[in-house]
Structure formats: structure tokens, C-alpha cells
Amino acid sequence: MNKTIANAKRLYRLKLNQTLPEYKRFLYNELLHDKSQILGIYGSRGVGKSTMLLQILNEMDYKITQKLYISCDHPMFQDLSLFEFVDEFAQKGGEVIVIDEIHEAKNFQKEIKLIYDFLNIKVIFSGSSAISITNADFARRYSMYHLPILSLKEFIELSQGITLSSYSLEDIFNRHEEIVDEIFNQLQDKKILKFFNEFLAVGVYPFYFENENKYIDRVNEVINTILHTDLSKICNIQPEKIVVLKKLLLTICVSNPLEISMESLAQRVGISKPTLYNYIDYLSRAELLSHITHEAKRFKSIKKSDKLYLANTNFFNALCLNSEIGTVRETFFVSMLKKKNLYYTDVGDFILNDKYVVEIGGKNKSFKQIKDISNSYVIADDIETGSGNKIPLWLFGFLY
């Protein structure tokens, strides 16, 4: 164990030689000041979890000998007991340890619980979104944070080197015209639709700013790693079934929401309907797709199709290069709001927080379908600013 800790410290010192981005994502300050003994960050691969962990560790006021970074995807940790390793580090004066890619460690749930129960050391860990499939204790026992894809706001901040404000959902609905003026006053380049269209195509992962030319290749790597590594290990999906998951994603990519029923979707990918629902759950939790149900399913058992979307708009370019603009618009909206209380409806497209009914469309979209519904709004693409109950679609990229 002494040799393993010595090697881990050596690797950590090598990490310290790497230049970290100056930009810090929106959860940074909250995580830095969280006093919990154990806290975790989960999210899709590529969203910047490892970078944020290192930024936080570098900022923490401990001696270099009292803090450590390890990544469980390194071979030395494959068959190692995390508890024994962390225990040894704590005995040698360790005060805080960052454990990256914790889902790669053997029996990681049991090991982190032992650390929580018996050791006096601060632990910050990161894991795949898929870890939430396996154990509800993560949300209850530890201080857990979800790091999503970049928002449009963050994309513009990174590309322009500026700082912008974020807004609550209620603020956007109630004072969107005023907010648009505030945003435009902060932008040197006022062409917000140019930024928005770029974001829809290539902007949801921070690594876009490392190498724009290789971006779509890396998005494909993200998809394949989630399928072949995260879901295969965490959900115990056999390798031959991963092909079915990929086929399911491709089918959703080329289909409009509600275009195909669950029965026909199951037939198309060659699996039973119960298995299809299991796979949809896996892919949704791993943030490869978004699964939106009808509002009436909350109250009673009714036969209503579910809506399936790719998890973000950049997946269209990576998976199928064939997308309807209406599907892209809805996919963006869902990707920014899926952690909210979001359902689809018969009249309008979605209902949010049991209050706001929205219809999504182009700049000429009318209120005809929702004119008799209170708290109803048209969310319109291809407009810079809205008026009354017509709100620009891009503005929902400023929620975080």
C-alpha cells in the first residue's frame, strides 16, 4: 500500500504541472464551500467534472502533502480497496482526497460507504450519471451535485471571454424582454442567433474549445465510452446488447418525437417492450437520451406514448446528420429543462412546473393552438427578442 500511495502522489504532482482552464463552471463556488464530509459530482462524460475537481482541490487551503487526487480508471486502482487506500492516506496525514471516475473502482458503493462511516477525511468524488441507477443512497447519504452539459450562457462566456448572468425560469417567463436587454448590454457581439446556432451544432461540451476540428469525433468517443464502459460495467449489460443500445439511439436520431410507438420501436431494434423500457431508463440516466412522459401519466394509468429525444443537439451531428428543425428546437429546450418538472401535453408542446404551457416553433408560430389556455407561451426560434407571451427560444439557454 505504501508503494501505491507513493505512486499516486507522484501522479498527482504530474497533474499539478498541467495548466487548468481559468474558466470555472457554475457549480464551482457551491462545491468549493460545501462543508460536507463526502460530496460527489455526477454527469455525462466530457462535461468538465475532472477539471472542476482539480480546480477545487488546487484552491483548498491544505498543504500539498495533505491532499491528493486519484483517478480510478488508472490500472493501479482496478483491484484496490478504496477504503484501505484512503485509510492509509488519512493515517499519513491526509485531509482531503479527490476520487475521479469512482464508478471504475471495484465495489465503489460499498467502499465509499465504509469511508463515510469510519474515516475522518474529506472526500470529493466524481462519477458517471449512470451511478444513480444502482443505488438511491447516493442522493440521500452524500451531498450530490449534477453537472450538466454547457448552457448557451456558458458557451458564450467561454467563446467571448466575458461573464454573463443566469436567470430563473420564473424570471424568464415574467420579464423576458427586460432580460434580453440586460444580456445584449453585456455582449460586444450582439449576434445572439449566431451564437445559438453554433451552440446547437457543436457547443455543449467544454472540449470544443480545445480542438474545434476534432469536436464531433470526440462527441462520438463520449457516446461510445458511455455505452461500452459505463453502462456495460455499472448496469451489467452484455457486450452484444450494446449494439442494440446504439441502434436505439440511431433510431431516435432519425425519428420525430411520437412518430413511432414503443411497440414499433421495440420491433425495429429487435427487443421486447419491457426490455426497451429498461434500456430507455439506462440511456436516459446516462444522459444519452431524454425521456419525457405525458402529463396525465402522473395521475392515472393511461395509454399515452412517451417522447424520446437525444440528450443534446450535438448528438445529431455525431449520430445521423439528419434532423428536422422542429426536433432540434424541442431537443434544445428539453436539454436545458429536463431536470425541471417537465411533461408533454395534448394542447401545446410541454407544461413546466404544473403552470407554464409552451408551444415551440419558428418566428412565425402563432398562439392559435394555445390561445384559450392560461399561462401559455410561444417559445420562438429565429427571433432575438420577444414580446408579451412570445419568448425567444435561445433565452432558455441562460438558466445556469
Image (spheres, grey):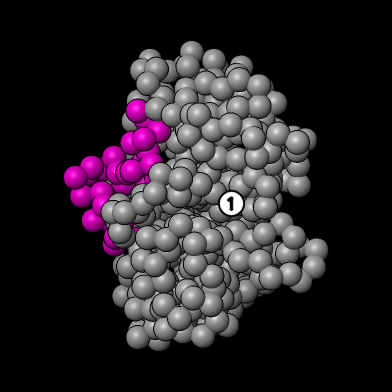
Residue beneath the point at 64% across and 35% down: 368
Residue found at x 28% / y 54%: 321
Front residue (pair 390, 149): 390
- Residue density around tag 1, few if under 14, some if 14–19, many if 20 or more, within 10 Å: some
Q: Give residue 373's position: percent from left, percent from top.
A: 75, 38
Q: Farthest residue toward the front?
A: 368
Residue at the (54%, 15%) spot, across then down: 181
Q: Which residue is mark 1?
A: 338
Residue farthest toward the right in the current orientation of the protein: 299
Callout 1 amino acid: Lys
Give x and y (percent) for residue 325: 40, 44
The relative height of residue 278 versus residue 336 in the rendered view (above or below) is: below
Residue 365 forms part of the magenta stretch? no
Above or below, 17 relative to 85: above
Q: Residue 124 in the image: x percent, y percent? A: 53, 57
Of residues 193 and 74, the one nearer the viewer is 193
Work out whether 270 lies above or below 265.
Answer: below
The quadrant the N terminus occupies is bottom left
Residue 317 in sight from this viewpoint? yes
Position in image of residue 169 (x %, y %): 65, 35
Segment colored magenta: 194-222
Camera-side residue of 227 and 81: 227
- For mark 1, give the secondary structure: loop
| Left or right: residue 255 compared with residue 330 | left
Of the pair 125 and 181, the residue shown nearer to us: 181
Q: Quadrant of residue 200?
A: top left
Instruction: Please say whether residue 215 is one of the residues in the magenta stretch.
Output: yes
Residue 44 visible, this orientation? no
Residue displayed at 39% across by 67% down: 251
Q: Main secondary structure of the magenta part?
A: helix
On the rendered image, what quadrant is the C terminus found in? top right
